[in-house]
Every structure is written in C-alpha cells, then in structure tokens.
Amino acid sequence: MANIEDHFRKLYARYGVGQDMPVQVQQIAELFDCSIRNARITLTRMQQENWIEWQPQRGRGKQSILRLLIAPDTLINQNIEQMIAHFDYGNVLKFIGNEKQALNRIIQYRFGAQENNSETRVRIPYYRDIDRLNPLHPLRRTERHLVRQCLSGLTRYDGVQGKIVPDIAHYWTHNEQATRWEFYIKSTAHFSDGERLSAPLLARCLNAASQSPWFAALFSDLSAIYAADEYRLVVETSVSMNRLDCLLATQAALIFDLRDSEMRCSGPFRIQRHQGNFLTLHRNEHYHQARPMLNEINIFTWAPESISMSFIPVLHGEQALDTRPLSERQLEKGSCFVLVDNEGLFADDVGRRFLNHVLQPMALLDRTNLPQEYASILSIAQGLLPEWNHRRVDFGNIPLPFTAHRQVSIATFGQPELVELAQAMADILRGHHFQCTVHVYTFEEFTMGNAQSADIWLTNFMLDTLSSPAFLDWLASSPVFRHLPEKAQQDHRALIQHILNEADDVAHQRINEYFHQLTHQRWIIPLLHHWMEFANENSFTWRDLSTLGWPDFSQLWL
C-alpha cells in the first residue's frame, strides 16, 4: 500500500487535484519508474480506491484523461481514521513516522472528546499500557484512579467535605464498643449487569476482599461479615474499631464481582474492553448515583517522542489549542525515595549514614539521561510528603563502610525515571569501590513479593488525597515496608490500628511521627517530589481536577 501511495504523491506533484489532464501511459510509466503494464495496473487500483478518474485511450500515441479526486493529505487522514476506528494505534505511529504536522493534526482532531449520535466519547493517549484493574492487588497511581471510576464502596472519602460519606450504604450505626456495625444498603444500588446489590452479595464481596494477602493488615481484626437481611449488612470486629467506615472507603473494600471472567462493576463506569494497549470504559447505566455525562472513555498506549504526554487535551478539537500559560502548580502528595534493607550491606548506622551522604538528588540527576525539561517538574524532597522536613544533613568526612568492594544490589520497578535514578545510584557507589547490580522488575513483580533480596530499594508513591483511607491504601499494600527492622514493622502494624481508631488529625500526626523516626534514622532517604501543573478559567485538560493528573470522569461536563 505504501508503494502505491508514493506513486499517488508523484501524480499529485505533477498534475494537481481536480483538473482533467491529457497524459500518455508511457509518461506515467516513466514517472513511476516502472513498465507500462505495471503503470496501468497501478492506475486501475487508484481508480478502484476512488483516488482518481482514469479514462484510458487505446492506440499508439493517443492521450488518456487523468483527474485526481483527492490530495495526499486527505489520503493520509483517511488511512489514520480507518486505523483509529479499528483501535490500531500502534500502526498509526508507524504510518505517520516522524511527520510532526500529522502528529499535531491527530492530537488536535482525533484525541480528546468526540460526539457521535448524541454520545460523547473521550480518547486519551497514555505513555504505557494500563495494568489490570484489580482492587485486591497493589495498584499504580493511574490504575488506582481508574478503578475508582469503575467501583464503589459502602462508604467513600469526599475530598470537598473532607470526610467519609455514604456510597452504596445509605447510613450506618454501631454499638457503644464499636465492635458491631450495621450498614443499611441503598435499594437503588446495582452491579453493571443490573443485578441488585443485596446485603448477602456485599458480604460475599467483602469476605473475599479480606482474604487478599496484600491488604490483610486492614481486615485482620474483622471477625465476621454477614447479612442480617436483604438490605442490612453486619460487620463484627474482635477489638474496638471506631473508624470502620474509613476502612470500608479503602481500595480493597471496593465492591466488584467476577462472572464468566468479566468484572461486574458498581461505580459510574464499567470495563467494556481491556486488551493489551487498549482500555475502554463505558457508562454504567445501572449506577446508583447521578450517571456520568460521558458515554465512553478510551485509553490507549501512545508514546511518540515528539509530543509531551502531560498536555494531551480532553477538550473538543476546536478548544484544544488553548495556549495560555499554566496558572497554578502544586507539589504531588508523594515522593520518590530509597529504603535501606534491614538485612542488606548498609543496614548498620555507618552504612545508612554513608548512603544518606552520597545519594544526593542533584548528584543522582547529574548522572541520568533524563531530558533537561525534567528540571521544571522536580523538587528536592526533605520528607516523604512536601510538608514534612525529616531528612538529616550529613556532611564532612563520612567514613566508608567496611563493605566496600562487595556486591551491592539495587531493586526498583520499570518506571523510566526510577530506572535512570537506580543506574545513577550504581554509578555513584561504583565511584566508592562498590560493585553494583541494578534489578529492574515489573510493577507486579516488585509489589507482589517476587523481587529478590536487595540492599537498596528504590520506589515512589503518590496519595490521591491526604485522607486516612489513602494512607491506609499505601501503608497496607506497599511491599518495601517489609524490609524494615522488626521494631519498625511492629510500629507499622500498630500505626494502621491507630488510624482505624483515631480522628484524622490525630492519626495524621502519628503518621508524621512514624516517618520522621524512620527518616531520621536513615532507613528512608527521600529524594524528589514532582510538580503537578493546572490550568484555570474555562480551560480543562486531562491533568485538571485530580492530583493524580486525571479528572473524575463521572463529574466531567464537555
């Protein structure tokens, strides 16, 4: 197909569009650099594709009539339209190659919101494939946001009100000891296939969630979950749990079910298709609250080097060229950090102090191949959260650990920034006479206990909100905390219990104190925060409304 298109461009360059041109087949053959027979075959194919009108004349020396019906740019757009219609985004990139103007046209007219037959669909490119949306597994920030677009819990955290509010549950009560809770279920709540969310069904879902090995710490004190009747769910605990409503707003407590290997969803959207580099979310017509204005969301892998993935709009095409400067920046609620393994080469005080001294963010960045534009989105971290100032300053003649000349293992997962930083760490340590190996795992391997032992763990995290459910999701599912000393792990388990029993302000102070101690002892070394950028006024892009860089599609009007 590419060869015939090349020939078509040659015709366009010589004859233009829309004019009846007298030509001889011999002239066309010379233009195509082929035989007269192949020139006739090519012209016939072009006519079948409705690119040209061709009136051949038989006889030596007689002239035929050629008329081009379209221009090559139109042809390119038609091919791109066909590939996009079949979700063939990988071949779109192969087709347009490095033609930046074609890229810009696609960004402007094909990505973002599209209306068709009174339905609004959004196409959003993303730099990597979306992992499986399973709330019972540890999830990356994007998957965590998307799974909450598809699933609801008995309760949820409302960021505007700053508190836990009802979701599938209409209201709830508990006894004086906070060991027996009763949740009254909305009669309007259904799965995405239309089945009503009864109390027995919810009990089955929550009992299954309590068996998740990654979130076991959250459910360990729940002794029974059962249905008292069709719309009343009972949760009993072995100890007082004053914030059970907070636990039920966490990721692991989101309600879903599997039927014939398909996920039945309880949130504003349902998963219609998730294959390879393509994810389609469709509006859940059985959602128990106000249904979204969007009918469909398509997210696909698209990572050409010539465009910035941070600025792909969700707007209609004619609004997408908003060039006004960004008016607001804020630091993400998270960071990139190092955790020193309790059984590794740097586990003693001397080793941890040495690492805290040499693993300086600027020294690491100087040794990476990250693009220079990265400087505008990075900030030096003094704590795991921007408002924390926990990292100690070590300077002067810091002694080298006795482990020099030994093999050091650094473990991280395959996020490009982390891989670059891990290699930079290895480079710094080699300069101090260490032999270093960097192990890069998939996110699934890294979080699900498949990673081998390491001396240094490099990871990152980002909270949706500074709420107790968000802290619980992170503390319960992050695997790196298992590599802390036993006392720190005991304090970690106790911290989760405090969060489930204390008011938010008290719980957040305990979290601050816990990580202040770990950072002060140099078990944790904060490295970098990232700036999130926002636009205001009437402008809306996919980076707005959410600190994760994603909007709440259920609340989106376009």
Image (tube, helix red, strand yellow):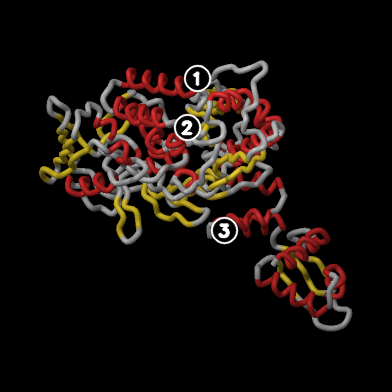
Q: Is 25 in front, or is 95?
A: 95
Q: Quadrant of residue 262?
A: bottom left
Q: Can you identify the residue that label 1 sits on?
A: 520
Labelled pair 2, 3 in contact (Cβ < 8 Å): no
SS at mark 3 in the image: loop
Q: Is 494 in front, or is 504?
A: 494
Residue type, numbered disc 3: Asp
Task: Point out residue 339 in the picture as x, y percentages from the top left corner.
Answer: 51, 32
Residue type, numbered disc 1: His
Labelled pair 1, 2 in contact (Cβ < 8 Å): no
Residue type, numbered disc 2: Met
Choose mark 1 or mark 2, whichever is in front.
1
Q: Residue at x 32, y 18 (%)?
A: 506
Q: Can you identify the residue that label 2 sits on?
A: 462
Task: Point out residue 554 in the picture as x, y percentages from the top left corner.
Answer: 38, 39
User: Which of the marked residues, 2 or 3, is nearer the chain's N terminus?
Assistant: 3
Q: How far, Cα to Cα, is label 2 from label 3?
A: 32 Å
Q: Is 62 in front, or is 103?
A: 103
Q: Residue at x 65, y 33 (%)?
A: 404
Q: Can you identify the residue that label 3 sits on?
A: 88
Mark number for residue 339? Answer: none
Vertical comparison of 501 with 229: above or below: above
Vertical comparison of 453 with 4: above or below: above
Taking the image as shown, residue 276 lies to the left or right of residue 361, namely left
Q: How many marks?
A: 3
